[in-house]
Image (cartoon, rainbow, N blue to C red):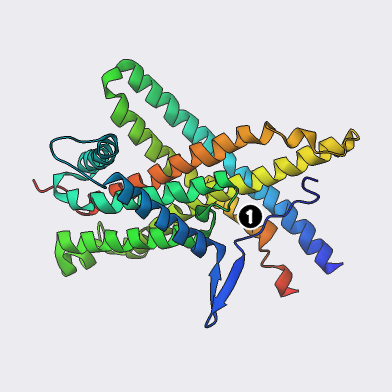
Amino acid sequence: MGLKEVNVTGPKVSFEIFGLKISETVILSWIVMALIIGIILFLTHNMSKTNPGKKQVVAEWIVTTFNKLVKDSMGERNIGYAPYMTTVFMFSIFGSLISLLGLRPLTGDFNATFSWALITFVMIQVAKIKNDGVLGYLKGFTEPIKLLTPLNIISEVAKPVSMSFRHFGNIASGIVITQLVYFALTSLSSAIGLDFPLFTIAIPSVLSIYFDLFCGFMQAFIFVMLTMAYVGSAYPEEN
Amino acid sequence: MEKAIVLAASAIGAGLAAIAGIGPGIGEGYAVGKACEAIGRQPECSGPVTRTMLVGCAIAESTGIYGLVIALLLMFANPFIGKL
């Protein structure tokens, strides 16, 4: 009954195809993708212009909220990024929220967050090249003086690293702390002579509200906001 | 014996790495305090102020997260054990 030892592992490898290791995270992200596609298809089913139903109102609310957010923080010119931002936000938040079902949150795997951050990195570079041209982009690294070129390159590379570590660290620390609390409560129950881990009922759910709901939502929001801030500043509004 | 020393040192190192949490704690507290002041002065700006504060907090948090990542590495994916 309960946890006998603290056991924190990375995502387990479920099976291999041609030497390619398919881990828990990959399978869970397929499930999350299918879930999101299902929800979106459900919400946008039977749309009508004259007589919108409840589902359509929800779908329209999501779209207008994200359009407004992107317009506010990236400018009118970058409104085309709104669908991508919505997708990453949805993926991240559902990926964190599956931990409510007792599954391993896929954002607790560094590979998942780092791949999103790499997409952001490519987007920043593309936006910069679009704004300044190839030569202007390369010249941008030597500013304000040529001596700072290595530092500029490091700060550029550090962006995806810090973004992905932030998202991963918040969720993974939640996993570790929850495990530790479960273990502590089990030990406490057995220390006072209970065979059944009585204290593990309901007490850890308070932590779950913080780590799963609040952190999951917050980190998804922050990841998207940072992506928007970086890409928006790389491709600013024309004066 | 060597392994025990490495394990003990790693555990101490993981604990020390968690000290990195102090800096972001102070910084974020300061940022949130200032944001509260700003909202108190201009309640109509609460939306953009909150948004900016959250992003600023997230950036201030990075150093703490780096410490956490090092602690996690030392505890669960120790690179020094393999070098013995």
Q: Position of residue A146 (x, y in %)?
A: 27, 64
Depth order, front residue of A144/A52: A52
Number of numbered labels in the structure image: 1
Q: Residue furthest right?
A: A193
Q: Is residue B73 above or below residue A221?
A: below
Depth order, front residue of A178/A60: A60
Left or right of residue B77, residue A210 in this image? left
Q: Residue furthest top?
A: B41
* Residue B43 visible from this viewpoint: yes
Left or right of residue B41, residue B81 in this image? right
Circle 1 crowding by C-alpha within 10 Å: few under 14, some 14–19, many from 20: some
Of helix, strand and loop, which one carries label 1?
A: helix
Q: Position of residue B28 (x, y in %)?
A: 47, 34
Left or right of residue A6, residue A19 in this image? left
Q: Residue furthest left?
A: A239
Q: Is residue A111 above or below residue A37?
A: below
Q: Chain of mark 1?
A: B
Q: Is residue A229 above or below residue A189?
A: below
Residue at 35% of width from left, 16% of height from top?
B40
Depth order, front residue of B44/B26: B44
Q: Position of residue B10 (x, y in %)?
A: 72, 58
Q: Position of residue B68 (x, y in %)?
A: 59, 50
Left or right of residue B4, residue A206 in this image? left
Residue at 82% of width from left, 41% of height from top?
A187
State which quadrant residue A75 falls in.
Answer: top left
Q: In the image, what residue type sits under mark 1? A: Leu
Q: In which quadrant is the C terminus of chain A drawn?
A: top left
Residue at 47% of width from left, 51% of height from top?
A95
According to the picture, the residue beneath numbered tag 1 turns out to be: B72
* Residue A158 visible from this viewpoint: no
Depth order, front residue of A191/A28: A28
